[in-house]
Amino acid sequence: MRQSTGQISRLGTLKSLLQRFAFLSLIGITFGLILIGKADTVLVERARVAVTDAVTPILGVMSEPAAMIANFVNNIRELAAIREENAQLREENARLLQWQSVAQRLETENRSMRGLLAAVPEPASHFVTARVVADMGGAFAQSIIITAGSEAGVKKGQVVMTGDGVIGRVTQAGLYSSRVLLITDINSRIPVLVGEAGNRAILVGDNGLRLRLLYLGSKTAAVQGDKVVTSGDGKAFPPGLPIGQVTRVEDGVFEVEPYVVRDKVQYVRVVDFGLTGLLAEQAVKK
Amino acid sequence: MQQTFLQRLDGNARRVVPFGLTLILMLFAMTPTYIPGLSHVTPMYALIAVYFWSVYRPDLLGYGAVFGIGLLEDLLAGTALGSGALILLLCQKIVLHQRKFFNAKPFGITWLAFVLVAFGASLLRWVCVGVAGASGFMPFGEMITSFAMTAALFPVIAWLLAKAQMKLLAQP
């Protein structure tokens, strides 16, 4: 009897020793992973792509109920405001018809001018529409996962937009899914033009809701209400894509509110403008 | 008494309930909620689940499982690899180390202790992401919002997990 009790206690000690060893080795592995993540980005990115591709179908199913509820709520809200919206749309339609005739006239003029100057046409853009299945709205990273990958023609570096404006860029393209780094992420840097004067600046995110303008030159280079569009510098984004509006100017800090309302985004467009980005393809591969 | 194959299968399925629910909560944190103003901060659901199971059923959630969930979260969320796994493991270790303290304590005390653990976890993750990331430290405010949401949602998630525990893991 005494012998078996001794055996049990020895087994218990062995088990607790093993558990302690497991804990310490796992902590060691996490530190190792943090270092690997910093050193070998290609390997880590491959792992991320494979895991994201595998989990995206599950996230797709899990995101359905919330999307259904959001659509239902939206439908009710729209029904309530239908008369008001109708009147507003009629008015807008009349205004847009005027603009249409202006645009047609300008297009004809543009075409003849291009012919006179023998200008090289800009490359045509293609787009892919994809559903948002995951929103990493953590305070530690701002990205979304969408249901289109290289199978659908999505490539790293492509611009992602909604009807309102730019929402981000593809940073990781798997076979059937992609990760989009949002413009609000702390790692996002976009060259932009501000206001009618077209002052150059860099738009940065800080993992919050708003964006900030850096390197704007002087403290008076932007005022509240100024529109912010991509400048096309560095060839990561084509010029003139709408991003947002300056909402607050204080002591040389310029806050920009994006046009895209993040809570409402269910579908996005991944646009291929045929741009190579900051670095040439070969340089990236090395 | 010999267990039948089905009984053994049933027993094994019940043993993976804590792991399964923690995994589902971690994935749930990533699905879009479409709630105005809240899409840019998500509570740390996985931390709540790991804490809950470490307090109430530590025998059913091992270090390996917690490490796996943390690693999967890092890979999916695009955060610094290893940082999520590190904080979940440390949270589990702290609770297991203080087993005597957590034994039969009222819910309020368990919640308060969670608030402290969650604050420590948020702070540590903030440091990890700041050190490992390319753009340095992020603003403190967003981290505090995420921590506050996690602390506030603890009773709701804990209540749901307790329901699941009573339904699926009740001793026969």
Image (cartoon, grey):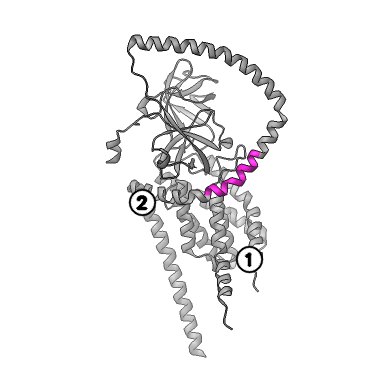
Residue A115 place in picture, x, y as percent? 35, 11
Residue A219 place in picture, x, y as percent? 47, 20
Decide which of A246, A153 is in the foreground and name it: A153
Give the residue type at disc 1: Leu
Highlighted range, magenta: A59-71
Image quarter hosting the N terminus of chain B: bottom right
In the image, A177: left or right of A235?
right
Q: Assess disc 1: are there few (<14), some (14-19) or many (≥20) residues with their C-alpha within 10 Å of its C-alpha.
A: some
Q: Do labels 2 and 1 share a chain?
A: no
B76 lies above or below A186: below
Residue B141: mark in rendering: none
In the picture, residue B116 is in which quadrant?
bottom right
Give the residue displayed 54% in from the left and 41% down from the top. B142
In the image, A63: left or right of A242?
right
Q: What element carries label 1?
A: helix
Image quarter hosting the C terminus of chain B: bottom right
Q: Chain under label 2? A: A
Give the residue type at disc 2: Leu
Q: What element carries label 2?
A: helix
Q: Which residue bears the numbered disc 1?
A: B168
Q: Chain under label 1? A: B
- Count of numbered circles on the image: 2
Membership of A70 in magenta stretch: yes
Q: Are marks 2 and 1 in contact (CB under 8 Å)?
A: no
B7 lies above or below A101: below
A84 lies above or below B98: above
Dot in front, 2 or 1: 1
For the stretch drawn in magenta, the main secondary structure is helix
Residue A35: mark in rendering: 2
Residue B72 place in picture, x, y as percent? 46, 53
